[in-house]
Amino acid sequence: MRICLAYDCLYPWTVGGAERWYRGLAERLAADGHEITYLTRRQWGAADPPRIPGVRVIAVSRGDELYGPDGRRRIGPPLRFGRGVLGHLLRHGRRYDVVHLASFPYFSVLAAAAARPLGRYRLVVDHHEVWSREYWCDYLGPLGGALGYAVQRLCVRVPQQAVCFSRLHAGRLRAEGLRGEPIVLDGEYAGDLAPPRPRHAEPLVLVAGRQIPEKRTAVAVAAIARARARGLDVRGLILGDGPDRALVLSEIAAHDLEDEVEAPGFVDREVVDDALRRALCLLHPSAREGYGLIVVEAAAQGTPSVVVAGPDNAAVELVEPGVNGLVAPSPDPDELADALVAIADAGLPLRERTCAWFAENAERLSLDASLDVIAAGYEGGPAHG
């Protein structure tokens, strides 16, 4: 089958759950013998082009910075990427049986829908997140938020095979007028499915992810400080980078934790896995998640997670309180500190339950299981608008 994937980021030039999903999807489909094209922005130098076996990577727009100084997405790069996708599909759409892309940035979905009468391909759209009107307005203000919400709603109503990764966002797709039923995938995990062995943890709280406002990384510093003030002798390791990095570093200094909390920035994947293996817990205070892959990756190492309840956080669907972690009721540092203390008090039995949880759910949460579902969707999804 001839499949075109389109996403404006490519792992490892940019790092995140969606980036790893599309990289894994491209590699698996190519290994299965499909002809794969990956449309993205140019994120690499001329001397270091992407080399993914069996995958033709095409840059359809330039490599502008995606985020402004405030940590919000810029409007220019999505527009240019959408224009690039439109031009490519108008010229080459008939080469493809399936075009599979992320709903965000939305202009590429509208481009694929506009070119489909000529290309006659099936359209598969991953909705990693579906934002509420309220969240849009909070993110962009009343005018920009209303426009963003309208564009999102328009993309949902394009004839497509919709895919999402949580019950939260499946429900929102239906509420926004999706035609047909979305495919709800349980897994994006591409690592080892062997059950982890329970081991005693180091007194280390791990925070990992892009440092943007909605991830609330700086709150984790205050939570670690509160937990230490209660007598919990823990250190912190904050991995990742982003517009909020200066705020994170200032919080470390403000709480006089320079010797107890490290924030080295982006690190190799092996460093992340090693930290997950050693940590007392993963602290993931994010306000907004379409899935929460890092929670599964922590469980794969036998490490429980602390996440935060909230209307836009689908990661809570991956945590069974008292089994593979805890759900804090809010991002208040005192409530996060409560969770850290509870994790420490639970000790090795909680880690044993986390290992058992992963062993029971690993196959369901695996990338391969999701790809099997996706392949069936390619065959049976709606072909045309």
Image: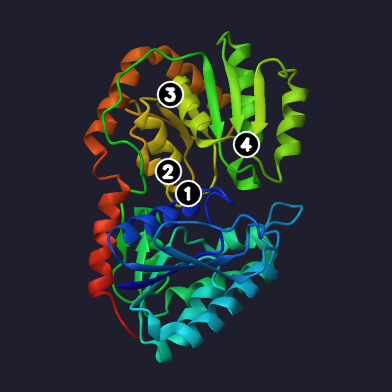
Residue closer to the observer: 233 or 38? 38
Q: What residue type is disc 1 on?
A: Gly
- Circle 4 residue: 217
Mark 4 or 1, which is nearer the eye?
1
Element marked by disc 4: helix
- What x and y, as percent, mark residue 301? 37, 27
Under mark 4, the amino acid is: Thr
- Left of 377 or right of it: where is 318? right
Question: Would you name the residue on which mark 3 appears?
Answer: 277
- Which residue corresponds to mark 1? 17
Q: Do the residues labelled 3 and 2 touch (CB within 8 Å)?
A: no
Q: Give the foreground label among 3 and 4.
A: 3
| Disc 3 element | helix
Between residue 149 and residue 127, name the one nearer to us: 127
Q: Residue at x 44, y 55 (%)?
A: 23
Q: Which disc number belongs to residue 293?
A: 2
Disc 3 vs disc 1: Cβ atoms closer than 8 Å? no
Q: Where is residue 195 in the image (x, y as percent from the top left)?
A: 26, 28
Inspect the image, locate mark 2, and give the three-letter code of the amino acid beneath it.
Leu
Give the spatial CA distance, label 4 vs label 1: 17 Å
The part of the image, by quadrant, that contains residue 267 is top right
Of the image marks 3 and 4, the number of the one nearer the N terminus: 4
Q: Do labels 1 and 2 touch, CB within 8 Å?
A: yes
Q: Where is residue 89 in the image (x, y as percent from the top left)?
A: 48, 82
